């Protein structure tokens, strides 16, 4: 059950927002700009209107990028990733309507669009909003109204980015073990299942290694739970530094971990795992002056050539090998066969 003293999830997330300033999407876009710079792209083929808009917006501290046609606008969108676009309707190459539609096809993050045009008919306003514009202003514009509407756009755009950043954070949290920072069971299942289908198809080697700390209960019993947590974190670090970028390690739960390795033969796996085993064996943990050594047992299972398998099966086989390692005296590596 959730402890009463725990801060509500929303509060945790709000404090996370600060560190989220560095969160980037898979396209490498920084969601919350630490400089608080708010970029606006102004698209208009009229030199006069470009200047008018730039003057008004710059005075308010907005960072303004100018484009005089649709082609320039598209380039500027990719290069500057503005949060808000103010676009004219009629332009020599593409229309503001087409530009709205093109922007809405880009799903990386929300771009707020204000259509600024001499067209004043209701049908035209409807067409503009239907094409993806968020707001509609007619020329000649009132500068106070322009800035007020840009202010609304800024609020909406920042909300969108915060939600997107929180969603990315939640996704990451749902795949991470909070104690060790390692990927959790869900994360490795997703990754390993993809790798295994590739390995079955293209016949490359794939290995699952289960690791379990030896007599770990006695660490908790004699040194306390915090000491136990410390050992778990240290073991996770050892796994991490020994895991190549193309492989993955995860905490399954409790004192059980799993390492998945690809593109390596059986000798290579045994060497890699033996290295981890002996590194842990050599560590000395100092708990309030009391020195302690901790060991772990490992069970290896691999995809057999020409015998398609699945993660569930490999985990079961690796667990059987791990069981044998325990039976044979612990602090050792065994392979399933
Ligand atoms: P064996 O060598 O057979 O694996 O013995 P063991 O004592 O390691 O195994 P057992 O399954 O009996 O005990 C596992 C212990 O791991 C019991 C539990 O308290 C402890 N444990 C599980 N999760 C955590 C955790 O998050 N933090 C701490 N400190 N201990 C944990
Ligand atoms: Mg025009
Ligand atoms: Mg266990
Ligand atoms: Mg154990």
Image (tube, helix red, strand yellow):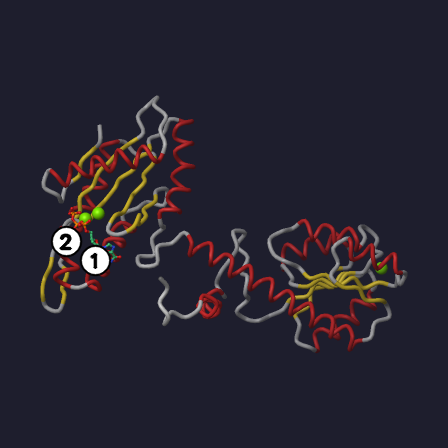
Q: Position of residue 176 (x, y in %)?
A: 38, 54
Q: Position of residue 226 (x, y in %)?
A: 22, 64
Q: Which label belongs to residue 257?
A: none
In-image side of 129 versus 165 (left or right): right
Query: If the image is split into quadrants, where does the C terminus sit?
Result: top left
Which element is circle 2 on? loop
Which element is circle 1 on? helix
Residue at image coords 16%, 54%: 217
Furthest residue toward right: 121
Dot 1 alpha-carbon crowd within 10 angstroms: few under 14, some 14 to 19, many 20 or more: many
Residue at image coords 50%, 56%: 168
Q: Position of residue 270 (x, y in %)?
A: 21, 37
Q: Position of residue 316 (x, y in %)?
A: 28, 35
Q: Determine whether label 2 and label 1 are within 8 Å by CB.
A: yes
Say which of 287 and 267 sits in front. 287
Q: Earlier in the sequence, mark 2 or mark 1?
A: 1
Q: Which label belongs to residue 231?
A: 1
| Ligand 1 within 8 Å, label 1 CB | yes
Residue at image coords 74%, 74%: 147
Say which of 319 and 43 sits in front. 319
Q: Using the numbered discs, state the Cα–Cα distance from disc 2 to disc 1 in whole angstroms.
A: 8 Å
| Ligand 1 within 8 Å, label 2 CB | no
Query: If the image is split into quadrants, where does the N terminus sit?
Result: bottom left
Q: Which label belongs to residue 294?
A: 2
């Amino acid at each position: 059950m959730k402890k009463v003293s725990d801060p509500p999830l929303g509060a945790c997330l709000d404090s996370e927002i600060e560190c989220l300033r560095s969160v980037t999407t898979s396209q490498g876009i920084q969601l919350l700009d630490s400089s608080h710079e708010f970029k606006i792209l102004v698209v208009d083929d009229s030199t006069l209107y470009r200047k008018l808009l730039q003057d008004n917006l710059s005075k308010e501290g907005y960072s303004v990028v100018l484009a005089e046609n649709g082609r320039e606008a598209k380039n500027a969108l990719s290069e500057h990733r503005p949060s808000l676009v103010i676009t004219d309707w009629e332009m020599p190459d593409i229309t503001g309507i087409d530009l709205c539609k093109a922007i809405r096809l880009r799903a990386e993050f929300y771009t707020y669009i204000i259509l600024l045009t001499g067209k004043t008919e209701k049908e035209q306003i409807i067409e503009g909003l239907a094409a993806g514009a968020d707001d509609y202003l007619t020329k000649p514009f009132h500068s106070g109204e322009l800035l007020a509407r840009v202010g609304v756009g800024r609020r909406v755009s920042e909300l969108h980015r915060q939600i997107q950043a929180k969603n990315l954070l939640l996704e990451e949290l749902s795949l991470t073990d909070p104690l060790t920072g390692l990927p959790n069971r869900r994360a490795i299942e997703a990754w390993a299942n993809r790798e295994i289908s590739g390995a079955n198809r293209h016949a490359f080697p794939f290995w699952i290694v289960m690791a379990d700390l030896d007599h770990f209960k006695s660490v908790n019993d004699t040194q306390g739970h915090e000491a136990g947590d410390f050992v778990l974190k240290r073991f996770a670090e050892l796994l991490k530094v020994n895991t190549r970028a193309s492989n993955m390690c995860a905490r399954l739960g409790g004192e059980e971990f799993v390492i998945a390795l690809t593109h390596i033969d059986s000798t290579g796996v045994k060497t890699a795992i033996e290295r981890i085993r002996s590194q842990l064996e050599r560590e000395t943990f100092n708990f309030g002056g009391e020195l302690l050594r901790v060991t772990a047992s490992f069970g290896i299972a691999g995809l057999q050539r020409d015998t398609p398998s699945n993660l569930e099966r490999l985990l079961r086989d690796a667990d059987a090998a791990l069981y044998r390692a325990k039976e044979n005296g612990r602090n050792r590596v065994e392979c399933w066969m």
